[in-house]
Amino acid sequence: MRHRKSGRKLGVTTKHRKAMFRNMATDLLRNGRINTTDTRAKEIRRVVEKLVTLGKNGSLHARRKALGYIRDRAVVEKLFSELAQRYMERPGGYTRIVKLGYRRGDNAPISLVELVTEEYKAKKKRRKAKPKAETKSAPKKSSKKKSAEELGLVEQQETAEGQVDEQGEAEMTEAESQEPKEQAGSSEKTED
C-alpha cells in the first residue's frame, strides 16, 4: 500500500531526480513551455506552482528560497518581477499540461507543459437561495381548516381554547396564593 507516499520516483536516483526537476523548472520558467513525458510533466507542475507562489510572496526569504532551488539569477529575477505580476490575481493553476501524443522511438506519452498566459477572470459567486421559511407570506391554511371555518367550528375551538387558558390561569393564581399559607403553616409547626 502507498499510503501517504507522494511523488513519483521516475526510475532514477534521488539526486538525479532533484537535479532533473531543478533543470526542468528553470527551463519552464525561462521559456514558458517545455515538452516532456506525461509523468514528468505532472511532477514538474507541482514544483513550478510552488515557485510561482514564492514569487508572488516577494519577500527576501522567498527570493532566497527560490535562488536555492533555481540557480539562475536571471530566471529568479523574471519570476519575481514579471511572472509574479502576471499571476498576482490568480489563486493557483499557473501551469497547463497538454497531451501531444506518443514519442516515436519508445512510444512514451508526451505532453507540453506551459505557463498559463490568459488573464484570470474571477467566477461570479452564486447567491444562495433564501430558505422558504424566511419568506414572509400569508400562512397557508389546509383544506380542513377552510371547511371548518365555513362551518363555524374553528371559532368554537378558539373560544374553547380561550376558556381553557382562563381556567388554567385561575388555577395557577389559586396555587400561588395557597403556597405562602402552607409555608407559614409549616413554620408554625416547627416552632411547637
Image: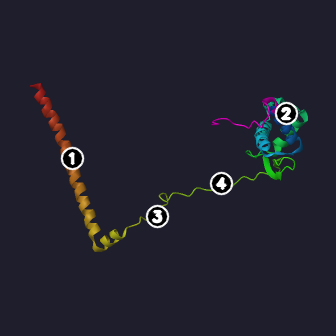
Is residue 15 in the magenta section? Answer: yes
How much space separates mark 3 and mark 4, taking CA atoms?
28 Å
Is residue 164 in the magenta section? Answer: no
- Give x and y (percent) for residue 53: 77, 39
Q: Which residue is mark 1?
A: 173
- Give x and y (percent) for residue 58: 80, 35
Q: Earlier in the sequence, mark 2 or mark 3?
A: 2
The residue type indicated by label 3 comes to Ser
Residue furthest front in the image: 106
The residue type indicated by label 4 comes to Lys
| 136 to 43, vertically: above or below | below
Q: Residues within 10 Å of mark 4 (few under 14, many from 20)?
A: few
Label 2 residue SS: helix
- Left or right of 161? Residue 19 is right
Q: Which residue is mark 4?
A: 125
How much space separates mark 4 and mark 1, taking CA atoms?
58 Å
Q: Residues within 10 Å of mark 1 (few under 14, many from 20)?
A: few
